[in-house]
Amino acid sequence: MEKEKESFIIHQDYKKLFDGLDDKQLRALIMAMFDYNETGQRPEFEDTILQISTLLLFNNMEREREKWHRIREIRSSAGKKGGRPKKAETDQDKTQKAEKAKKANAFDKKQKVSKKSKKSKCNVNVNVNDNVNVNDNVNVNERERDNPPPPLAPGSESAAHEAVALINTLAHTDFIVTDEITGNISEILRQGFTPEDIRAVIRKKCREWRDPLNKHDMRGNIRPSVLLNPRRFEEYLHMRTRTDPPAQSETDRGAVTDSERIERIERIKSRLEQIESEKGAAARRDDQYVLLKSQLERLEEIPRT
């Protein structure tokens, strides 16, 4: 790796990752970033959290470096062209410019006439800023304020970083955490699933879709938007595939503890109440509501240990 780029970017999003580290881990991670920027060598850590964290951060640093090189080449090329004398303008060039200007003026006049005609037919007032007002007095910003998105479920951000890092490790990809991914993780947690369920789905589907014996190439599906789809998560979690290990008995795999079962039931009930308050009688026709009710019934049927 070249040494001429003597700086690198630490994004604000990294704070969410850094907050989950202790002082020793944080110092080791930051020093590893400096070493990687200087030498290009990726250090190996016995600490799994640090190993996964550096994979995500180093991929981002590499993209920033490639972007920096592209910009430098463009500026260098532009600088070389800056000193060249301009080509003398011929009569033909002048004629072509005049014709283009004439066509542009004619088009501009037609546009003005068209706008006046539309304005006379309907009373629509569009302000080019954050607000869009029509004669029905509908304000986009007011609608968004009256119906804000639900708050993130506790642990959504850390679970999102962990999920994306696991996908990148298993599939050799370089996805980054986005608001959409964090929102999907939040919805999955609200449905009563756990971070361990999320890790299980990622491992299961990565193993299945990367299986060389598959008739169809499914590797393109190994991306967060597919793996972390709240509407299909339960299906992925409970679907058995050819690559799954043999089924274990309840005794072998360990039954759900009472505390875990009660915690899941409380989370699901809370989410059901939220959907009912938002949608009223229509909640019972909501796909997510039906799915959560099914999960609640299964959990309540599990015998206590």
Image: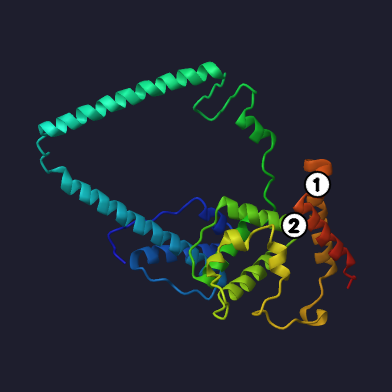
User: Local crowd at mark 1 within 10 Å, few (<14), some, or many (≥20)?
Assistant: some
* Residue 68 quadrant: bottom left
Q: Is residue 159 left or right of residue 54?
A: right
Above or below residue 185? Residue 102 is: above
Question: Would you say 76 lies left or right of 64 here?
Answer: left
Q: Name the spot of residue 29 as percent of width and height, x first.
A: 48, 64
Mark 2–mark 1 Cα distance, whole angstroms, equals 15 Å
Q: Residue furthest top?
A: 120
In x, y percent, where is residue 200? 67, 70
Tell me the residue that label 2 is attached to. 191
Indicate the amino acid at tag 2: Gln
**Tag 1's secondary structure?**
helix
Residue shown at 61%/75% (left/top)?
208
Residue at 32% in and 57% down: 6
Residue marked by disc 1: 283
Residue 31 visible in the current orientation: no
In this picture, residue 298 sits left or right of residue 26: right
What kind of residue is marked 1? Ala
Q: Secondary structure at mark 2?
A: loop
Percent from the top left, x then y, of residue 85?
10, 40
Q: Using the image, determine if residue 278 lies above or below residue 170.
A: above
Please rate how many residues cluster around mark 2, counting C-alpha atoms within 10 Å: few if below 14, some from 14 to 19, many from 20.
Answer: many
Q: Is residue 237 visible?
A: yes
In front of the other: 232 or 82: 232
Q: Quadrant of the C terminus?
A: bottom right
